[in-house]
Amino acid sequence: MLNELKSLLIKPSIHHHSYSHTVCDDTVPDEFSILCWNVHKNNDTFSFSNYIQEFVKRKPVDFFLFQEADFKHDIELKIPTLTFNAAANLEKGSAFYGVLTASKCKTEYSKPFLSHGKELLFGPRKSLLLTRHTFKDGSSLLILNLHAINFRENRHYYKEIDHIINIIDNYKGSMIIAGDFNSWNKNRMKFLHSKMKDLNFDPVPFSKSDKVKSFMKNHLDFIFYRGIELVEQSIERNHKLSDHHPLFARFTKLS
């Protein structure tokens, strides 16, 4: 019990984690896909890796955006041939937890962030990760993977969304913002979508019947995009690995 409490109160000894695989593409293909998923700390298991390997046979994935991911510093994931960067907000034993972005291609730049506020005042901060990748023509794709604050008043949630906006406000190019936004009431939902609209982001349009993780009929998980074109989207439900379902989206670069 004491170790559990300690892991909640103390910042991780290493915030930014990474692993570079020797087999790695230099650039993002003009048509690419992402899988965004709150994995509930279950990604470091053989059942998870087997699920992913079967999934990518049906739908190839270029970027994996995980929240509540389990990882170790500079150690390969159980999903083979992927490079990853991660931002930890929890540490327990030799394991770290937080948001993780894994890809088939190189990461030109990555930077981790922590939320300003803590969960329940004394709990952990939430983590965010910004990565930059390059298309063949030299233009950039930015990806912000996040797990938003949950157990705080709406006013604190609004501050955290503004913090997120400040991170990417000066960048005007192609970008994806995705993750678990914890937008579980109407006021949070309205604020979030208003901010995204102001920055010309569109949400991937998953429907109510798609079984996106929700609370009181409000979706928690989103993929927002800008400067690229959405080709297809889907949600996978038959996995039994997390209380969230993986969101899949395929995009193409605008000419």
Image: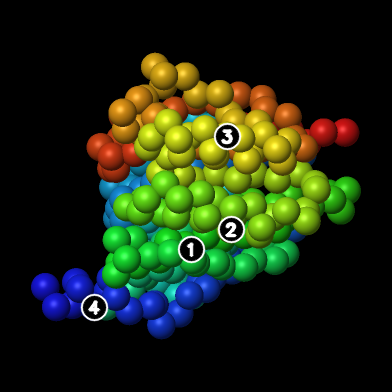
Which of the pair 8/14 is nearer the observer? 8
198 versus 82 height, above or below: above
Q: Amino acid at mark 4?
A: Lys
| Res. 103 in view | no
Which comes before the other along the chain, label 4 or label 3?
Answer: 4
Report helix, strand or loop for mark 2. Answer: helix
Amino acid carrying mark 1 in the image: Ser
Q: Is residue 110 visible?
A: yes
Q: Earlier in the sequence, mark 1 or mark 4?
A: 4
**N-terminal of the two: label 4 or label 2?**
4
Q: Are marks 1 and 2 in contact (CB under 8 Å)?
A: yes
Q: Quadrant of the C terminus?
A: top right
**Residue type highlighted by circle 2:** His
- Assign a secondary structure to mark 1: strand
Asked whether the residues under the numbered discs 1 and 3 touch, taking CB atoms below 8 Å apart as contact, a structural biologist would say no
Is disc 4 placed on a helix, strand or loop?
helix
Residue 124, compared with residue 82, is above or below; it is below
Neighbour tally class for label 2: few under 14, some 14-19, many 20 plus, Cα within 10 Å: some
Residue 242 spot, x, y in % from top left: 29, 43
Name above or below for residue 143 compared with residue 7.
above
Task: State the CA–CA distance, disc 1 to disc 4.
Answer: 19 Å
Q: Which mark is residue 193?
A: 3
Look at mark 4 in the image and give the residue it sits on. Answer: 6
User: For the residue marked with disc 3, what is the amino acid?
Assistant: His
**Residue to which mark 1 is pinned:** 115
Q: Residue 163, which numbered label?
A: 2
